[in-house]
Structure formats: structure tokens, C-alpha cells
Image (cartoon, rainbow, N blue to C red):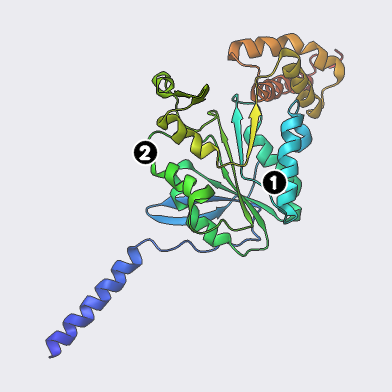
Amino acid sequence: MTELSDLMSRAERLLERFEALLPGPATAPDWDAAVAFRWQRRHGRAVLKPVRSPHRIRLADLQDVDDQKERIDRNTQQFLAGRRANNVLLTGARGTGKSSLIKALLAEYSDRGLRVIEVDKTDLVDLPEIVELVEGRPERFILFCDDLSFEEGEDAYKALKSVLDGSVSAMADNVLIYATSNRRHLMPEYHDENLQARHIDGEIHPGEATEEKISLSERFGLWISFYPFSQNEYLDIVGHWLASFGLPQARIDEARQDALQWALMRGSRSGRVAWQFARDYAGQIGEATQHGEGAGR
């Protein structure tokens, strides 16, 4: 009997040690520690990690995307006011300010309770757990998925589709999903899929493969498209950043040709390229001024 008791005791201790190794539910973070958080899963354990120094950018810094700013800003203010608002999909050309716009919203409205949780595509299967963690909180949470795209049959695709619209349980009213992508329908589109289209009573009906791809993007209530910048728009953005770095207008005018050459070498006139050029140019001017070169130009 004593041997059986010892065996049971050893088995219980072994089970306790084994249970400690199993991934448990994520615990709530210190909500006052930050306004932005990152969902991370490492070695099977999930944690909502505070971002101590989020990227600060103002809405006013985003140039030549006024219509896009106005639409997502209106949606976000409705959300903060507790009114109806939509999940948002921002798509289009790279470097045009899609993710920067979401960061700027956080900087603009964090004092009104807006919080952002960044979720990698591979962790989208955890969306129900994240929603459960923040449900009932007084803050308003944007779940931010950056540079989103899927291949056929990915679990993350099914998880996002379910949370957006197809789940039995409703989304918490203090949560929205804002996602950015270079693909309008979040999945690759192939030429042979067009051959599956059917003509019925003079109307074109997409094939099943195309319908499946559209079904996810359609679950976002608000689509916001971004387009490549023209030369003048690109130079406007360069000028804005150079001015914000403290360069006088004469210097900004001188930089135009260099800015165009920079864009030509990069093969893009995006807002990101404009910002990178401005940082480089302002850095060179600052270095020359520090060494007493060109101070009178």
C-alpha cells in the first residue's frame, strides 16, 4: 500500500511538472505600460508585449493622401465614439503610407483610449484569443496586420475570415481589424482563373477560385486604395520632410534634382523613398554645416 501511495505521489509531481511546460492562455499585460502592443508566440507561449517606443508620426506628416486620411480618420473617430465602424483594408502601391497612416492614428488618438496591437500573419490563428483578452476593456483596440497576403490553404487565412464575419460569436465592440496589403484580394491571382468565369444573361460571374479569394477582402467593410505618386507629389513630400528637418526653402529648392535622381536609382517615387532621401540629404547638409562647409549657401 505504501509503494502504491509513493507511486501515486510521484505520478502527481510528474504531471505537475508536465503541466507547467504546456502553453497556457496569455495573461493580460500592464495596460498602462504602453499604447501599442505586439502579440508574440514563442515556444508555444503567447504574450502581449508592450511597445515602449512606438513609431511616432503625425497625420499632418502624411502628404498627398488626403482622401485616404479623411476616410480612415472618420471611421476611427466613429469607433472611438462608440458608434458603428468598419474593419479596414488598405491596399495599393508600396511605400505610399498605408502602415504609417495607422501609426499616425495611434499618435493622434491614444489620449482618447485608442490602442494598437500588432499581429503577424503567422499569429492570426490566435485572433480569437486576443479578442477574448481585450473584450470588456475600456480602451478601443485596433488589431493591426501589416503587409498581409496569403497562399492557398493557410490556416491564418481561415482564422481571419472567421473572425471578420464567419464565426458564431460576434466580434467584441471595442475591437477593429486594420490590415495593409499590396494585393487587393490578399491572395495571388492567376491568369487561368479568368477562364473559369461564366457569362449568365449578359453578366460576368467569377469562377469559384476567384470567388473564394474575393470573399475574404469583402469582409472588410472599408477598402482604402493607395496609388503611386506623381513627380510633383513626390517632390511635395520631399519638401515637407526637408522642412520638418529644419532646412530653409532655398535648400529645399536646390534638392529637387537630387531627389529625382534618388527616386530614379530606387525605381520608385513613393513616400517612403521621399522620406529616405530627405533623411540622407538633411544629414549631409547638417554634416557640412558642422564642419563649416556651405553654411552661407
200 or 189: which is nearer to us?
A: 200
Q: Is residue 125 left or right of residue 96?
A: left
Type of residue at label 2? Gly
Taking depth in this image into account, of 175 and 280 the one nearest to the observer is: 175
Q: Which residue is mark 1?
A: 106
Residue density around tag 2, few if under 14, some if 14–19, many if 20 or more, within 10 Å: few
What element does badge 1 sit on? helix
Q: In the rendered image, is residue 57 in sight? A: no
Q: Looking at the image, is mark 2 or mark 1 earlier in the sequence?
A: 1
The residue that mark 2 highlights is 153
Residue 246 position (above or below residue 31): above
Q: Is residue 250 visible?
A: yes
| Residue 226: percent from left, percent from top | 65, 27
Q: In percent of the image, x 75 and y 31: which residue is there?
A: 67
Is the residue 11 above or below the residue 86 in the image? below
Amino acid carrying label 1: it is Leu
Picture residue at 47% right of the left edge, 41% below the top:
121
Q: CA distance from mark 2 to mark 1?
A: 33 Å
Residue drawn at the location 79% of the way across and 15% of the way down: 293
Rendered location of residue 79, percent (x, y): 70, 51
